[in-house]
Amino acid sequence: MNLDLNNLIKENLPKQTQGKVASYIPALAEVNPNQLGVALYDLKNKEIIQAGDSDVRFAIESISKVITLLWAIKKLGMQEVFTHVGSRQTGFAFNSILNMEINKLKHPMNPFVNAGAIMTTSLIVEDKKRDPEPFAEILDFAQEICNDPDLYLDDVIYHSERRTGNLDRSLAYYMKSKNMMIAEVEPSLDTYFEQCSMMVTAKSLANLGAVLANDGIKPWDGERLISSESATYTKSLMMTTGLYNQSGTYSRLIGVPTKSGVGGGLVSAAPHEYGIGVFSPALDKEGNSVAGLALLQDIVDGLGLDIFK
Amino acid sequence: MNLDLNNLIKENLPKQTQGKVASYIPALAEVNPNQLGVALYDLKNKEIIQAGDSDVRFAIESISKVITLLWAIKKLGMQEVFTHVGSRQTGFAFNSILNMEINKLKHPMNPFVNAGAIMTTSLIVEDKKRDPEPFAEILDFAQEICNDPDLYLDDVIYHSERRTGNLDRSLAYYMKSKNMMIAEVEPSLDTYFEQCSMMVTAKSLANLGAVLANDGIKPWDGERLISSESATYTKSLMMTTGLYNQSGTYSRLIGVPTKSGVGGGLVSAAPHEYGIGVFSPALDKEGNSVAGLALLQDIVDGLGLDIFK
Amino acid sequence: MNLDLNNLIKENLPKQTQGKVASYIPALAEVNPNQLGVALYDLKNKEIIQAGDSDVRFAIESISKVITLLWAIKKLGMQEVFTHVGSRQTGFAFNSILNMEINKLKHPMNPFVNAGAIMTTSLIVEDKKRDPEPFAEILDFAQEICNDPDLYLDDVIYHSERRTGNLDRSLAYYMKSKNMMIAEVEPSLDTYFEQCSMMVTAKSLANLGAVLANDGIKPWDGERLISSESATYTKSLMMTTGLYNQSGTYSRLIGVPTKSGVGGGLVSAAPHEYGIGVFSPALDKEGNSVAGLALLQDIVDGLGLDIFK
Amino acid sequence: MNLDLNNLIKENLPKQTQGKVASYIPALAEVNPNQLGVALYDLKNKEIIQAGDSDVRFAIESISKVITLLWAIKKLGMQEVFTHVGSRQTGFAFNSILNMEINKLKHPMNPFVNAGAIMTTSLIVEDKKRDPEPFAEILDFAQEICNDPDLYLDDVIYHSERRTGNLDRSLAYYMKSKNMMIAEVEPSLDTYFEQCSMMVTAKSLANLGAVLANDGIKPWDGERLISSESATYTKSLMMTTGLYNQSGTYSRLIGVPTKSGVGGGLVSAAPHEYGIGVFSPALDKEGNSVAGLALLQDIVDGLGLDIFK
């Protein structure tokens, strides 16, 4: 490891001033923007290197879409999941219905836009419909894949998400009106808002990235958690649709499968090399962490991780 | 090389019956659909392996967008090119204006949709405006990067493309009306239709793929033709936007940077391993070669080339 | 009155076979398509002429949008209502969100598309928020303007509408997410579904049309029910947006302000001359009564009612 | 005539400061914004009343769409014209392709958006294809229907329109690519730009409006110029689509069939009462004359011309 992470933190932290923390709910709006943390899980040496605010907890938000996708595939199989959700970029914002309605699509376009993630979650909800609490198993799985038993649901964020989530409600009822939804709308949304409200650290995300980078095997105990195919496909989706409407741009500039969340998190998976977690809450206008992406780009360049190179 | 290419050709050729050759111009409509050819440039052994109809000439069509992009970057620099064209999927067909107009975009979304390719070509045309024939240097460059001195312009196809290219004309005048176009519309389109009408073989495309896979260096003579950055970025774009509206789907299923053309060609670049050229003219409804994609998937699986794995 | 209405009924009834009754809820799907009725309120002679199935009750559906618009204007004033809803055609189906989202509009485009009607209803609901049943006063007003004390809410239709109304729910939550909605979504929708489920006859609609045609004064008792401005503006809106996506076409072909509903009703208001109610439940693919529009056109031609002529 | 037109001019002229003259070509940008003129053709008294800048010449621009529509109907018949163009509002700006592409329409939506007007013109061009100058007969017809032998083509405006009309070119080639266009694109556009460049006065437009208001008969000589049906349908279209994207709003607020042009002209036809021409070049952001519409509204209110009242 020939990178001075502390120095990279110092260089990139000031870039957070170019962004703004998410403000649609109070719990996010109150987060201190002046934070930047990183954790790398080095698969060769089986060690985690950390720097900056790498143990600060923050809301996982859209990065939870990776976890529920993996869980849905594990539970229901690849085919069942991709019967209900596509693998294509929409060309619009993550919460837009435009492409689905213009093209009269029969399913949401990918699991990382909101409509697709609600669909993935609803598949889990439907599968668990005799269970009083479908979120419990998602939380268990999240703790396991993040190797983070302290990962928890933040009730304040959950209730805020639920109260303000009317655009998600609109998407879900649209899908229901077109007979796409399997489970009921409200329990699907409740579970979706719960998954978005899990509290993680950059280190948790480095572990998540490491499982993906390690072909589905947890490097810390050598046990397979998800199938190789599941890890491969999910990395591909992260590359093509992981950074909202800027996925294509960052595929070009960074070239490592990455998923972002409006809590300021980033998870990357460089196959066979590193799982990376980054946290910095100030966002660009597309919803991606400004200082986080800048730091990630430096790390990818420094370690030569671009998979297209 | 532990793949029996001849057997793979035999297995995949019958799938062409699920597709149809392009029919918008006579010269394409008359092509025999019952063809399948492949060529692999093996970077380790510096040899080309071929099978099936690998020396049959066919129209390069959209695969020319890779070549003009590389040439534009070589001539004008990365920054100049990506000032005029983006790196994002549109979410619509390759010849649709919808996303650009709905989102009031200031430039076409990527170099592999028609609007973006016309833009790339027009940058070259503008740069050559004192030259009586801007296409000549594109042809020279194509012959060099494909290591194919016999690569030529088919006049019949060119004139057909030019006569029927009214949707491209509409896109170009739209961009002109929004002050995006640098060069004049008609010479830009003429050059664009010329580049689409170059005749290649699967072998030519394997060479093109090999230069991309080899970080920009021609493996056959060890000379650098394009910059490392240019090769890397172009592979990323092929991954996220190379297969028309199904780019995301095939990123997931194939996982190797690939560009298709409605002439039935496919070019892939597996970094540091193989350049691959495929030809089979029967297309699925998105415009990608049916038997060609099936064969490519078998090869990628057989050789373990998925870059996300 | 020099029209033989019975003969016109006979001539136009067979055209119903070109259409189909609405099928999205059982109570509509079971209606006998072979019905055609008409009632004309002649303002000069202050008499009603009827023919065919003019006393058959059917679901008012979208024609209720006229009544709630008039009620909202009466209660809240013209300015308040048109602060929250526009007066323009959308260019899309009555239940589409496309134009509102593409153009990032701040309010629904007119009171006769579903989004606009939900908005109008929600203004009434909000105004009545201390009242346990906001629908009661809409029903009272409907009975008065239709001069039909037997006009009632059909519970079976209401519950079906409510159960299947997910696209309306999607529209309402979209508007809520954009801060357009004043009242809560669910009570607004409940009231909206109630108003759609009122049971009327062609005769009721002739009376409604007569009040509009008579500048807002009930011709049967000479009392003003709505303002002149309200009657005028509503007739204009019926002309430009009353027949769903075919409003422009029928403005040209019929030329009398008209509003349709998927229950098979039509209400027209020929200024100073006639209020007209028509009923025939088989619909064209835009949702307008086939035989009803044909009959209406014959009546308009026969009586010379086209206001553009 | 109980209106003091000079006083209305004085009251409404200052409103021009809320608008701006069209600036896309120099010849329009240089027009003095501080002008307001009106002419009324009173059908009962067969006299023209004028006030303000009613004899100032200005570019007819989109009002020419009324004239070519009437000419196309006269030459080719109602059915032929409405086979190639619809009667519906698009929901978007007059030069947008969005609705046509989203809804995969087979023809432009109405004769008063640019795509529809280019289509109408191309029908005339095709009909005249053996004639060296298809515009000549349009000019003749314009002079006749405007009772204005001095109405002429402004060459400077024509050449400016032609040079800057790339968005129209884009629309025309789009229609050609979808096999909608009958005539060739370039001569159709040339004729279209010519018709837009005719120079009229408020008085010319009052005469045009008077023929429409008088059921197709020229009131000045009692001869029928266009069919009754043609006059009726065209008035309907002016009502539903005549004021660009604000047609519905002004149908509600003004209630008289009206067509605007970006040269600052307005023509209205109040059936059996008045033809009205207005001129004031400063436009609102939709492209309609600000002071002109305000003056028109006062006149309509003062004379009680709203056809919905």
Image (cartoon, coloured by chain):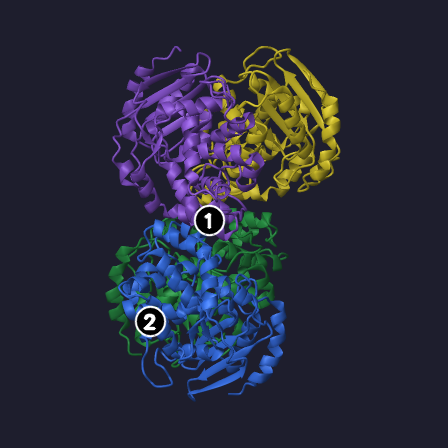
Chain colours: A blue, B green, C purple, D yellow
Residue B2, given in percent of the width and then of the height, sits at 28, 78
Residue A44 picture location, percent across and down: 42, 87
User: Is B252 rendered above or below residue C116?
Assistant: below
Residue displayed at 48% across by 77% down: A201
Q: Secondary structure at mark 1?
A: loop
| Rendered image quadrant of residue D201 | top right
Q: Is residue B109 above or below residue A215?
A: above
Numbered badge on residue B127 = none
For the point 32% across and 75% down, which residue is it?
A226
User: Which element carries disc 2, helix, strand or loop?
Assistant: helix
Left or right: residue A150 versus residue A300 is left
In depth, the one of D308 and D208 nearer the eye is D308
Residue at image mark 1: C184
Residue B289, by quadrant, is bottom left
Q: Amino acid at mark 1?
A: Glu
> Of C24 and B259, which appears nearest the observer?
C24
Marks 2 and 1: which is nearer the front? 1
* Residue D293 image offset from top left, x and y in percent: 64, 31
Question: Is the same chain shared between marks 2 and 1?
Answer: no
Label 2 sits on residue: A137
Residue for point 39% across, 10% down: C2
